[in-house]
Image: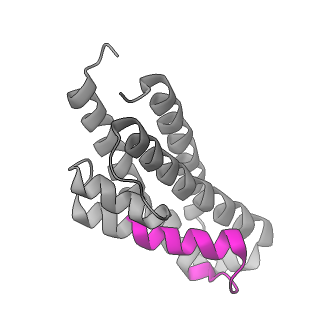
Amino acid sequence: MVNRSLLSSKLAELADRVNRLRLLGALSVEELTANRDAFELASFNLMLAVQICADIAAHLIADERWPAARNLAEGFTRLEEQSVITSSGGQALRKAVGLRNVVAHGYARVDPAAIHSAATDGLADIEAFSQAVASWAALRHGASH
């Protein structure tokens, strides 16, 4: 059974990262490019937000004893298969894992336009994930657990 306290804590942490990104997303791409500190802060918060989503997916998979995911992106596929999230939500988060990997591992120069897009348009996908997980947990395990 899902540890509701841990899930609630992770969702609160995710909401905080989204709020930080929303503030940074108010900057234009040009402002983000020119302000290295803001760019790095946006990149860092985005990376952490996606990581929190992946951690939540891994937690649900383990606690529900669903087949293990082989990587972060597959965790979202597993949640789709179990009807926790929509296929469009899973697709968006698998794409976000790719950007998270670029930021986390420095595979290539991180594109400020990609970070800006994720810190603006991409937040809806993260918020939808959060809402879907919270709704699924409430329906599946009830509010009392």
Q: Is residue 142 visible?
A: yes
Magenta region includes residue 104: yes
Image quarter of the C terminus: top left
Q: Residue furthest right?
A: 37
Segment tinted magenta in the rendering:
93-113
Q: Is residue 26 visible?
A: no
Please identify the quarter of the rendering in which residue 125 is found: bottom left
How far across and how far down the image is residue 19, in percent?
A: 54, 47
Instruction: Find residue 82 and report its horizontal and vertical position in percent.
Output: 23, 50
In the figure, is residue 24 to the left or right of 69?
A: right
Q: Residue at x 33, y 35 (%)?
A: 134
Is residue 75 within the magenta segment?
no
* Number of on-image labels: 0
Left or right placement of residue 15 versus residue 111 in this view: left
**Where, by quadrant of the figure, is residue 32 drawn?**
bottom right
Q: Please determine whether, in this image, residue 73 is positioned above or below residue 114.
A: above
> Is 111 placed above or below 44 here?
below
Q: Main secondary structure of the magenta part?
A: helix
- Rendered-image quadrant of the N terminus: top left
Task: Estimate the x, y position of residue 10 in percent, counting from the top left.
Answer: 52, 37
Q: Taking 144 as reference, is 6 above or below it? A: below
